[in-house]
Amino acid sequence: MPALLVAALTASPAYAAGVTALPEPNSIVLLSLGITGLVVGRRIASKRDKD
């Protein structure tokens, strides 16, 4: 059983030496859409408060 665990860890690219894991493009798009939504929402809310 420990040999299976060692094989699984060494085969995974996240544990490879010298390799930086990059997030998936979908994750970056979702994060940027969420941040954009927050910024736009706050701007709209601040304009309502001034009126």
Image: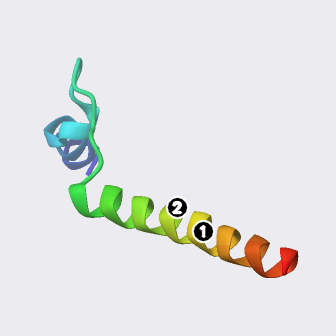
Q: In the shown orientation, is residue 38 left or right of residue 29?
A: right
Q: In this view of the protein, which residue sits in the foreground, 23 or 13?
A: 23
Query: Where is residue 51 shown, x and y percent of the image?
Result: 84, 81
The colour scheme used to paint the residues is rainbow
Q: Is residue 27 above or below residue 51?
A: above
Q: Residue furthest top?
A: 18
Instruction: Report the label total.
Output: 2
User: Which residue corresponds to the image point at 67% horizontal and 76% vertical from the top-left?
Assistant: 44
Q: Residue furthest front?
A: 51
User: Which residue corresponds to the image point at 52% horizontal and 61% vertical from the top-left?
Assistant: 35
In three-dimensional space, the C-alpha distance between marks 1 and 2, rounded to whole angstroms, equals 5 Å
Q: In this view of the protein, which residue sits in the foreground, 17 or 33?
A: 33
What is the number of the mark on residue 38? 1
User: Which residue corresponds to the image point at 27% horizontal and 29% vertical from the top-left?
Assistant: 20
User: Which residue corresponds to the image point at 26% horizontal and 52% vertical from the top-left?
Assistant: 1
What is the number of the mark on residue 12? none
Q: In the shown orientation, is residue 40 left or right of residue 36?
A: right
Query: Where is residue 39 shown, x and y percent of the image?
Result: 60, 63
Q: In the shown orientation, is residue 49 left or right of residue 21?
A: right
Q: In this view of the protein, which residue sits in the foreground, 6 or 33?
A: 33
Q: Could you tell me which secondary element the residue under label 1 belongs to?
A: helix
> Which quarter of the picture shows residue 9?
top left
Q: Residues within 10 Å of mark 1 (few under 14, many from 20)?
A: few
Q: In this view of the protein, which residue sits in the foreground, 36 or 30?
A: 36
Q: Is residue 12 above or below residue 28?
A: above
Query: Where is residue 23 shown, x and y percent of the image?
Result: 30, 48
Specify the amino acid type for callout 1.
Leu
Specify the amino acid type for callout 2.
Ile
Q: Residues within 10 Å of mark 2 (few under 14, many from 20)?
A: few
For mark 2, what is the residue? 35
Asked if marks 1 and 2 touch (Cβ < 8 Å), the reply is: yes
Q: Could you tell me which secondary element the residue under label 2 belongs to?
A: helix
